[in-house]
Each structure stands twice: as C-alpha cells, then as structure tokens.
Image (cartoon, grey):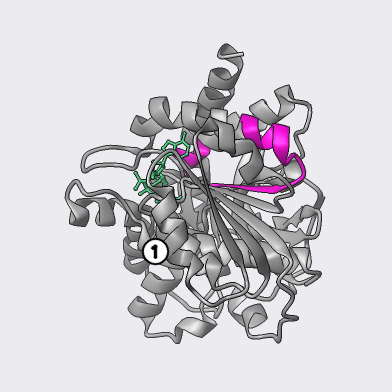
C-alpha cells in the first residue's frame, strides 16, 4: 500500500521513543480477547499509556474482573468492560485502534496453521463487528495464524465495503523484539542501539530477519547468521515448549503489541517519524501481503520501506525465495475461507 519509501533516513523506534512526547490522552483503544494470556498484560500496558483516554475491554469470558482490577490504576484512561455479542457494538463505537488477540494459542507440537479452524472463525466474526461499528479504526491482528487471519480480515472488510488497506496490520512486532534481543545478546551490543528489520510473514521460515540491514552495522559469520535466524524463527516454539502445554508467548507478546499500539498512537498524534515492521497489504513483492518496515501516519500506512529488499545477502535472498511458497499458500487459504463462508 501507499508509496514506496526509498530514503535511507529512518529512525529506529528506540531513537524515536526517546523524543519528548506531547502528552494528550485522547485516543480510544479496544482490545478483543482482553481477558486472555496476552489480553491481560496488554491491557495493563495500554492502561499505562498517556495517549489513551478510553480503554474498552471485550471478551467472551472473565472480562469484568480484569476491567475492575485495571480501573484502579491511577492513569488517565477510563476502563470499561464488554462481554457477549450484544455488547460488542458498544465496545467498538468511536474507537481509534482495535487490537485482536482473541483465539486459541499453540500447544507443544502444534504449528500456527493448526489453529486455523478455530481462530479463522473468531477473527471473521470480530472483524465483521469492527466493520459495522468502527470502520475507520486501525486494526491490529494478533490471533494466529497471522499469515492467514490478516487476509481473512481484509476479505471480510471488502465484503462489508469498508476495506482500507492502510489501516489493517498483522502484528509481527514480537519477531523484531526477539531479533533485537537475541542479536544484542550474541554480539554483546547495547540493546538501545539495536534494530533488526524482520520481513515476510509470521510463522516458521516465513519469518525472515534481515541481519544485513540491522542497526548498528555488525558483521556475522555464516554460522552466526544461521543460528540467529533459526532462533528468531523458532522463538515462539521455544516459549511454547517451555510452557509445556500452558500456552504460548503472552508476556513478550503483550510487550510487543503494546509497543506497536504506542507507535500507532504516536502516529495518530502527529509524530511524522514512526516506522515499524508489520504484515500489511503490499506491493513490495509479488505476494499480496508481506511484512516489512512501514511508515505509519495519521491515516495508517504511508509507505513501505522497499529499500530493505535491495542488496540482500545471499542467505537472505535464499530465505526470501524459500518463504514465498508457504506464505502464498497461507494467504490463499485465508482468502478462500473468507469467501467460502459468505
Ligand atoms: P488465551 O487462550 O490465553 O486467550 C484468548 C482469549 O480470547 C480468551 O480470553 C478467550 O476467552 C478469548 N476469546 C475467544 N473467543 C473469543 C471471541 N469470539 N471474542 C472475544 N474473545 C474471545 O490465548 P493467548 O495466549 O492470549 O493467545 C491469543 C492468540 O494470540 C492466539 O491465537 C495466539 O496464537 C496468538 N499469538 C500471536 C502472536 C503474534 O506474534 N502475533 C504471539 C503469541 C500469540
């Protein structure tokens, strides 16, 4: 979507975060699936944002207590709980950003695609409600498989006549967060300086970290590139196995999703220097959706950083070609689901 950005002048989030923010609590955020493993800590982190005036929490279960608990924090936003289909439309009225972490997580041995049957239906029904009640909101899809749930959301929004590709985002921030952490550890770098773009999609080999494009400019041996890339791709599975049946990443995911929400809030508030990786409709490759760095502004995606795909290392070029088949299949599966169910 939007213009391709070829400038090499992009500030990393760590740099832009340190700029002084205008404190203006005026944005409304809704979280659908707010009582879940991700939803609860994400709600807490968003409750801490000085830019949020209203925080609407929706879930099919247990959301009243989460909202009561959070509402006691003395930060500006007003917290309200909503549950059941009847309350969903009120939850979504006048909302600026809708975040969707509703759905089941992985257990050991599962791929993200194994979640498709259940989560596809959940995302479909929630996005239908978003289309009816807050068609102008930024929509952040966390529910997996993101490579399919984002295309599903796009199709549903098209069916409802309100699709704006600039405002639909698959949240891949956790891949960037993991990449920054693992690379900084491996190379003994100060985390504040590290920014690794991660492109492609959000599952297995479709997650492609671009170590050749990271800041600061660091050199790696072939073994280091292989080890780091594979660890970043399997970061989610590392957590799923450690939790041994009790779910997937929730705390690091909440942290990553809160960073992405905060970036979008800053963009909505007029910061003209907001860049994040996200899975969006894109012309950067021949695939209809692709994760890459995007510039975010008041109206959503202002452009993709196409220069990230120029001058890739041999390892990255191979990774890019290898991921296209799987990503294409996942996108098509989502599109077919949304249209079969019409
Ligand atoms: P969880 O099971 O702890 O929470 C899910 C919540 O969604 C529950 O509170 C449940 O009641 C709620 N829910 C289910 N159906 C709903 C509906 N129709 N409307 C509203 N709420 C509904 O799961 P967890 O750990 O929070 O994970 C949520 C999703 O996030 C999973 O699909 C998981 O795979 C995905 N995920 C995505 C990541 C990413 O990087 N994009 C990283 C980690 C997880």
Residue 43, image x and y in percent? 49, 61
Quadrant of the image where one finds ligand 1:
top left
The reply to whether residue 167 is in sight is yes
Residue 174, image x and y in percent? 46, 59
* Label 1: which secondary element: helix
Q: Is residue 155 magenta?
A: no
Q: Residue at x 60, y 51 (%)?
A: 30
Along the viewing direction, whichever of 176 and 39 lies nearer the viewer: 39
Residue 123, image x and y in percent? 52, 33
Q: Is residue 320 left or right of residue 19?
A: left
Quadrant (top left/top right/bottom left/bottom right) for the N terminus: top right
Along the viewing direction, whichever of 181 and 95 lies nearer the viewer: 95
**Relative height, residue 115 to residue 332 (above, below):** below
Q: Is residue 329 left or right of residue 245?
A: right
Dot 1 beta carbon under 8 Å from ligand 1: no
Along the viewing direction, whichever of 172 and 98 lies nearer the viewer: 98
Along the viewing direction, whichever of 325 and 182 lies nearer the viewer: 182
Residue 38, image x and y in percent? 40, 54
Q: Residue at x 53, y 83 (%)?
A: 193
The magenta-colored residue range is 128-148
Dividing the picture into quarters, in which one does residue 117 lie?
top left
Quadrant (top left/top right/bottom left/bottom right) for the C terminus: top right
Q: Residue at x 59, y 72 (%)?
A: 49
Q: Residues within 10 Å of mark 1 (few under 14, many from 20)?
A: some
Q: Is residue 130 magenta?
A: yes
**Disc 1: which residue:** 252
């Amino acid at each position: 979507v939007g213009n391709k950005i070829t400038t090499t002048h992009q500030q990393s989030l760590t740099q832009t975060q340190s700029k002084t923010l205008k404190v203006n609590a005026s944005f409304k955020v809704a979280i659908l699936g707010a009582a879940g493993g991700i939803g609860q800590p994400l709600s807490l982190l968003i409750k801490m944002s000085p830019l949020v005036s209203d925080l609407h929490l929706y879930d099919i279960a247990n959301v009243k207590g989460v909202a009561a608990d959070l509402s006691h924090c003395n930060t500006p936003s007003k917290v309200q709980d909503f549950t059941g289909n009847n309350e969903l439309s009120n939850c979504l009225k006048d909302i600026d950003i809708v975040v969707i972490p509703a759905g089941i997580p992985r257990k050991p041995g599962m791929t993200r695609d194994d979640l498709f049957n259940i989560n596809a239906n959940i995302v479909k029904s929630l996005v239908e409600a978003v289309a009816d009640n807050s068609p102008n909101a930024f929509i952040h899809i966390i529910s997996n498989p993101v490579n399919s749930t984002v295309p599903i959301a796009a199709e549903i929004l098209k069916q409802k006549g309100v699709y704006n590709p600039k405002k639909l985002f698959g949240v891949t921030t956790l891949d960037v967060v993991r990449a920054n952490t693992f690379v900084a550890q491996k190379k003994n770098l100060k985390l504040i300086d590290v920014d690794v773009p991660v492109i492609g999609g959000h599952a297995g080999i479709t997650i492609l970290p671009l170590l050749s494009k990271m800041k600061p400019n660091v050199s790696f041996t072939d073994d280091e590139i292989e080890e780091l890339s594979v660890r970043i791709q399997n970061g989610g599975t590392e957590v799923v196995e450690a939790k041994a049946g009790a779910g997937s990443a929730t705390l690091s995911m909440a942290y990553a999703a809160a960073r992405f929400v905060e970036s979008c809030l800053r963009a909505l508030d007029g910061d003209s220097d907001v860049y994040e990786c996200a899975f969006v409709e894109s012309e950067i490759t021949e695939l209809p959706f692709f994760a890459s760095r995007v510039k975010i502004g008041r109206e959503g995606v202002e452009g993709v950083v196409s220069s990230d795909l120029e001058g890739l290392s041999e390892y990255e070029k191979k990774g890019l070609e290898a991921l296209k088949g799987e990503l294409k299949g996942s996108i098509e599966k989502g599109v077919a689901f949304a249209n079969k169910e019409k």
